[in-house]
Image (cartoon, rainbow, N blue to C red):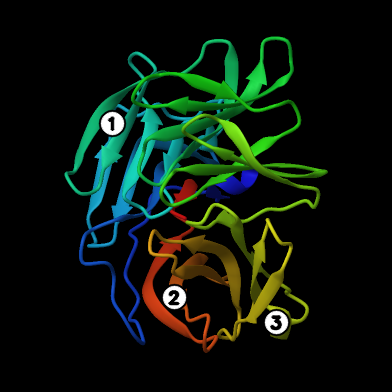
Amino acid sequence: MAAATAAVAFTAGLSAAAPVGTLAGTAPATPVIRHAGLGVCRNGAGRRPCGPWRLWLSDGRVRALPDAHRPDGDHPAMGVMAVAPDGGRAAYFRKSDGVLMIWEAATGKARRTAVRRPDSVAVTELTLSPRGRFAAIEGEGLSGRPVDRIVDTATGKAFDLPRGYDSARFSPDEKHLMATHVRGAVVYSTGTWSVRLRRSAYMMGDLGPDGVTVAKARWNDARPAENAVTVRNLATGKKRTYPVRLRRGEAPYRARWDRAGRLDLLTDSYRGPSGEEYHVYTWYRLDRTTGRLRRLDSFTVTSAVGDVILAG
């Protein structure tokens, strides 16, 4: 499930996520979550994460979640916080009782779900589906065996993936889930958890609205000209590659489908180590007819952020 969330660990605390001017397009009109993160406190000569979780929104606001469970030695940041692919929602375990809460960007309010953090699982990663209907919980059970569990946030019902499979991505309409194994990929229909198709080739990436097409960003630091987005049909095996021309120092980070079948690309530009290091993340929309990129949104995350979990 490592691909189910985009999480970046830094060594400091809280930042302001400042919009960067765009060439074409602007931040979404309806606010979405760009990323979640923690603050930082000094501990002698070093620093440690502290304070509540915060959500940085596309309209410039920062919202604190004082009731969200913070990571500890047994629960890394990815195990207690998740942001939906489109940034519309964030999920977290409430620290008072372990209930899974979903914060809605559209309303600015959190709602409780029918799910609690399992006592029998040391959760290492939490993933939220695009519309918030499902959450994927990855961790280790009391026996030491890995657990990859999909839970219905409305009913609390759970579906455990077969051993060796990681839940990767939900389709934008949440009707399908792609799970991956070193020997292949399986697409499930979430209504019945029946297998829609199997593929013998290892596959990672974002699952499209049709439930069979997967998109993945490909990064080559040594040969930037080979940076691309690859799109593969799991049913037919056909693949198409879209080269992407980016600014110097800008690298593809993640590909993402939306509900209308449009394909977006998140890139990362790292600045450092002189002075204060920071990352500039940019969302582009890929025109699959022309291969051109149209910039949608950009934002900055400085090294003042202790743990970052990105939408997408």
Q: Is residue 279 above or below residue 174?
A: below
Q: CA distance from mark 2 to mark 1?
A: 34 Å
Q: Is residue 242 above or below residue 27?
A: below
- The one nearer the camera, 278 or 89, is 89
Image quadrant holding the N terminus, namely top right
Q: Which disc number belongs to residue 273?
A: none
| Amino acid on which disc 2 is placed | Arg
Q: Secondary structure at mark 2?
A: strand
Tell me, yes or no, if residue 237 can be seen here: yes
Q: Which disc number belongs to residue 285?
A: 2
Q: Residues within 10 Å of mark 3 (few under 14, many from 20)?
A: some
| Amino acid on which disc 3 is placed | Pro
Q: Residues within 10 Å of mark 2 (few under 14, many from 20)?
A: many
The percent coordinates of residue 74 (x first, y second) are 59, 23
**Side of 11 where 33 appears, left or right:** left
Look at discs 2 and 1 and give the one toward the viewer. 2
Q: Is residue 97 above or below residue 207?
A: above
Name the N-terminal-most of marks 3 and 2: 3
**Side of 253 where 200 appears, left or right:** right
Residue at which label 1 appears: 66
Residue at which label 3 appears: 224
Look at discs 3 and 2 and give the one toward the viewer. 2
Q: Residues within 10 Å of mark 1 (few under 14, many from 20)?
A: few
- The one nearer the camera, 201 or 268, is 201
Q: Secondary structure at mark 3?
A: helix
